[in-house]
Amino acid sequence: MNEQVVYYETLKNFVNQDRGYRAKVVIKDHLNPEDIIDRMAAKNTTITRQDALAVISLYEEVIAESLHKGYSLSTGIFRASLGMKGNFSEEGESYDEAKHEAHVTLQVAKGFNQKVTGKIKFHKKRDERRMENLTGILDYGTGERLPDDEGRYSITKGSPFELLGHNMKIYKYEGEYSLVLRDGEGRKLALDIVKVAPGKVTSFVKGDVPEGEYELCYVVRYGTVTREYGSLRVRVL
């Protein structure tokens, strides 16, 4: 793996105030299994998403079955075994579901921590105003991500698109996400949101939406706070 720059911020240590501040690594984004499979396929053009999905599903199934049968196991990433929570009042006492609970114990495999952290450079995150704005659109129907000569982005009906920007996901609070098409007469059409990530929102335009020019607006509300990200001019195809 190449050397990577990872950012961190410092937070007041309220648990042990004598120790001043503690560090918190700034997470870029959260990857789900679909994201991991996409990256696997990108690294090896001979593997399909279906192949990767089948292998991962089978891998998880075998690990779960092995632990269920009482085996411990090791992988290149972790070691796993069964454990038990709860105390026994005497040596001859039997397992009681009301008092005892089985659980899976995981430990990082030897060498994996060094493999991940060995080529990381930590940089302090600068204290600056968070940017909250839209930067573009990637249309899967046309493969385009650049606007036309009039500054309009393409969105193909029935195909997914990604609205790109900064700080588009709320983590500390339950956010209400709103993505709206607004036509020239001010009429609004709410779009279904498939996925929200810090740098993009995935959505689509249904096939019964009339073709033409619109403004695409993105707003996030949480608590009493409203974040308005502005709008982009789009052309629905």
Image: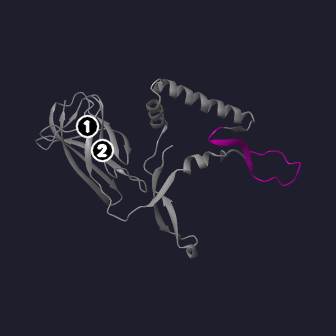
Bounds of the magenta segment: 75-100
What is the C-alpha distance between the residues marked 2 and 1?
Answer: 10 Å
Across and down, in percent, residue 179 comes to 27, 44
Q: Which of pointers 2 and 1 indicates the residue nearer the eye? A: 1
- Which is nearer the eye, 58 or 42? 42
- The answer to whether 44 is drawn above or below residue 131 in the figure is above
Q: Residue at x 28, y 37 (%)?
A: 138
Residue 98 can be seen, yes or no? no
Magenta span dominant secondary structure: loop
Task: Look at label 1 and name its amino acid.
Answer: Arg
Across and down, in percent, residue 69 comes to 74, 33
Direction from residue 157 to residue 67 in the image, left or right: right
Res. 145 mark: 1
* Residue with the mark numbered 2: 164
Across and down, in percent, residue 35 comes to 45, 37
Residue 83 forms part of the magenta stretch = yes
Direction from residue 94 to residue 125 in the image, left or right: left
